[in-house]
Image (tube, grey):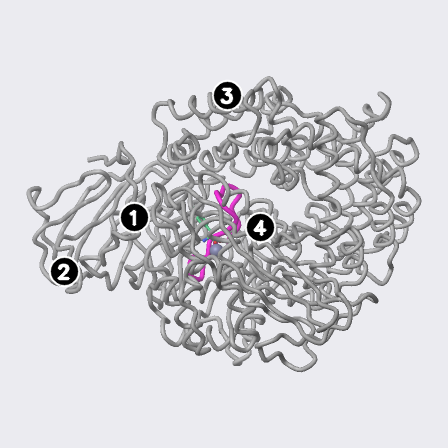
Amino acid sequence: MRTDTPSTPLTIYRKDYIAPGFWVDTVEMGFDLDPIATHVATRMTMRRNPESSEKDIVLFGESLKLLQLRINGVSVKKSSYSIENGILRIRNAPDELTLDIETLIQPAKNTSLSGLYVSNNNFFTQCEAEGFRKITFFPDRPDVMAKYTVMLRGDKKKYPVLLSNGNLIAEGDLPGGRHFAKWEDPFKKPSYLFALVAGKLVCQQEKYKLKSGRKVLLQVWVEDGNLDKTQHAMDSLKNSIRWDEERFGLELDLDRFMIVAVSDFNMGAMENKGLNIFNTKYVLANPSIATDVDYAGIESVVGHEYFHNWTGNRVTCRDWFQLSLKEGLTVFRDQEFSADLVGTATGRAVKRIEDVRLLRQVQFSEDAGPMAHPVRPDSFVEINNFYTVTIYEKGSEVVRMYYTLLGHDGFRKGMDLYFQRHDGQAVECDDFRAAMADSSGRNLKQFERWYSQAGTPRVKVESSYDKASKTYELTLSQSCPATPGQSKKLPFHIPVAVGLLNSNGKDLVLNLEGQATPSKATTVVLELTSAKQTFRFTGVAKKPVPSILRNFSAPVVLEYEYTDEELGHLLAHDSDAFNRWEAGQRLAMRRLVKLTKSVLQGEALELDSMFVEALRSTLNDRTLDPSFRELVLTLPSEAMVAEEFKEVNPQAIHQARQFMRSSLTQQLRADLLTAYEENLTPGKYSPDAVSAAKRGLKNLALSYLLEWPEDATFALAKTQFDEAQNMTDRLAALTALTNFSGSAKNAKVSAQALQKFFRDFKKEALVIDKWFMLQGTARTTDAAKVRELMKHPAFTLSNPNRARSLAFSFCNANPSRFHAADGSGYALWADLVVALNKLNPQVAARLARSLDRWRKYPKALQVQMKAALQRVADTSKLSKDVLEVVTKALA
Ligand code: 0A1
Ligand code: ZN
């Protein structure tokens, strides 16, 4: 009997949660690995849960052939069970039982990359969120936690390496050239953390001594030929282990910890217990293939998955609505890890700025669109669609607000209590909040709204200064726009960190009326809990400049009517590096909005000298870290500018921003050249923060310099491309060359460089991804060019990285071309979503999100976007993943 996915997708509601009818204590699995037909035998010991209203055994299964079903050794009668809509239901089961199930699955045919699948002839699994049900019938829900023993059998030549969770307890040969390995995971876990890997792999390994003195085995497994690219991942793993011991007192609980890299993977990586499976993108690095950004990405993802071992695995989620319990918290932890590793105050601020940029650019947009959902959603159709920036990044901001409210030590106490209470359990977001409240004695009831209400709150601030009484008042009011299903919002509990600068740019020591402030405090956290509140500072000798929402203390939009002079003052002096950067962004944004309006009205474009000079002095301020200068000089993206408009005209925004870039280049040419020359990093490549920062500023300068057509700067980029000793410099030069609009001669040189890059790296899949990405986002690339590139022999839609490198980069990161007036971008998008839907619904659904905000565009574009969405919605055999996204977009 073959089971299929339900035909009409159901909405699942959080309020409908019921505890499982049966618990599973132990699971023994046997796999006979074969790409065409893998036989899976599962034996589980189960016992009735007296607290559940569910009386039947409910098991989920998808694309499975059921061979056997036995209770206590006896075949279950046909009349005692049913299989319907992916649910196997057994009635009248005894209170305690052993259930045996045998299934047959087809890994080679599994292109969804969920469940057991084949990549480059090796076997891998991906079980989060609901992939385990594609392996066997099981109560595949995170609150059912069991101990697993796994026996893997397969051809010894084809699959010399056999891995699963936990400890290797036996291995040996079998007749017929086969062999086996038996693994036992000592910890109980939900099925989504199950993993197996089998195939031809090699590993870098190391014994590592924990703080306690216990020794553990660390392994990084890759395909043959990639062992020269594992050192950074191994170093990142050791740093992660050390950091979690030091910062949170959390020790690795296993004797062996494995990371495996696979080139076909839907996401970044997966925290399976003791056997993390990673997208190669987040493992493989050496200076010739990986950029500084890649190195940083590997460090943070290795950290993220490792930190899940406690936040996610030891304490897991009761149901998938609680996903942010593990994801928001673990993102917060990986952000702190990366910040702590850099160590310096500026390094921390730079990391914070980068994280906030992502939040604002992607999450704020999600929160304002048809897929907006609370950090703890109330419903979903397909859980895989809810691995979102809201769950991850906004979820992390919510955790960070506890940290801001309770302080470093207070937060740690809360974490300690959380583990003390819930180790080994599957719990809810509310349990985390309760641990934070109970450990600190604070009332965090209202804080719950951060979990239940979607949308980005807006905080409007007004100030007034009274000279006679030397008081300075800030009046804060909050509001939150309506989101799908939530028309009215109640006030949030918002921590707003504030400082006041005097005319010399120095921080004032603050006296906040009615609140005991620590002596000499120059930043206070105002707690905004009502719709409108006034805070009064006393003893303020002269009217100050307020620095509001320091370090971005809450995920809100701040509205305060700064003058340009005030922003210039903050940019030059604020002791809070985040707000210093923010002031520069506000100056830039104001001008970008104005320039865009001028483009739309056909007016002449102009850039004022105040702004140019402010950027010049930042660029030339050698007391500032190069990475900070780079961030200040990086203009708000076109997507950020789009958020400022009710109706978005992507081409006008592009033109305005390009004008700003080229005018800056024209006026800062000498300063940019100096920055370029001062930040060369000769000698051996190192990905450390100091060298990476220099390369970052140097390459930013280069990208600016090529905005102004000039043979000398073009030659500079060409030389950098030819002589680069690392991928960071090579790719930066190639990007600048590709986007250079100069003579036909130069265009030819750029094209040749692009071809050479392909030839030099054609064996390195991750570099070829960069090659496609560069072209997907190139200023001259339109939909026709993308279609042409899709015919390139190196292109395939079935590898998610490759699909993302071209299709996603064009649809999501090349707005002025994607939104071409002729609708060619949308037609391409629809073709791609439909094609991907057949191969890999998860990846298709991600791409489907590119048209989420179609209502924000001019009517003429809206009509074409709607038609494209409708075409996808009308496609037969649409997965529920894609159906949910396009239905919500059209609703
Ligand atoms: N839990 C992983 C992310 C992940 C989620 C779903 C996946 O397949 C649908 C795969 C990975 C993490 O946060 O890293
Ligand atoms: Zn995660």
Asked if 799 appears above or below 688 in the picture, the reply is above
Mark 1 lies on a secondary structure that is strand
Q: How far apart are the two marked residues, 3 and 2, measured between alpha carbons?
A: 59 Å
The answer to whether one can see residue 150 in this image is no
Cβ of disc 3 within 8 Å of ligand 1?
no
Q: How far apart are the two marked residues, 2 and 4, measured between alpha carbons?
A: 48 Å
Cβ of disc 4 within 8 Å of ligand 2?
no
Asked if 187 appears above or below 126 in the picture, the reply is below
In the picture of the structure, the residue carrying the numbered disc 3 is: 863
In the picture of the structure, the residue carrying the numbered disc 1 is: 13
Compare marks 3 and 1 and give the one earlier in the sequence. 1
Asked if 858 appears above or below 351 in the picture, the reply is above
Please provide the residue range marked out in magenta: 260-277
Q: How far apart are the two marked residues, 1 and 2, measured between alpha carbons?
A: 30 Å
Q: Quadrant of the N terminus?
A: top left
- Classed neighbour count for the residue bearing mark 4: other residues with Cα under 10 Å, few (<14), some (14–19), many (≥20): many
- Classed neighbour count for the residue bearing mark 3: other residues with Cα under 10 Å, few (<14), some (14–19), many (≥20): some
In the picture of the structure, the residue carrying the numbered disc 4 is: 359
Mark 3 lies on a secondary structure that is helix
- Classed neighbour count for the residue bearing mark 1: other residues with Cα under 10 Å, few (<14), some (14–19), many (≥20): few
Query: Which one is in front, 213 or 847?
Result: 847
Instruction: Tell me which residue sits at (29%, 48%) in the image.
Output: 13
Residue type at the position of mark 1: Tyr
Rendered location of residue 184, percent (x, y)? 35, 64
In the picture of the structure, the residue carrying the numbered disc 2 is: 97
Does the stretch in magenta take in 274? yes
Residue type at the position of mark 2: Leu
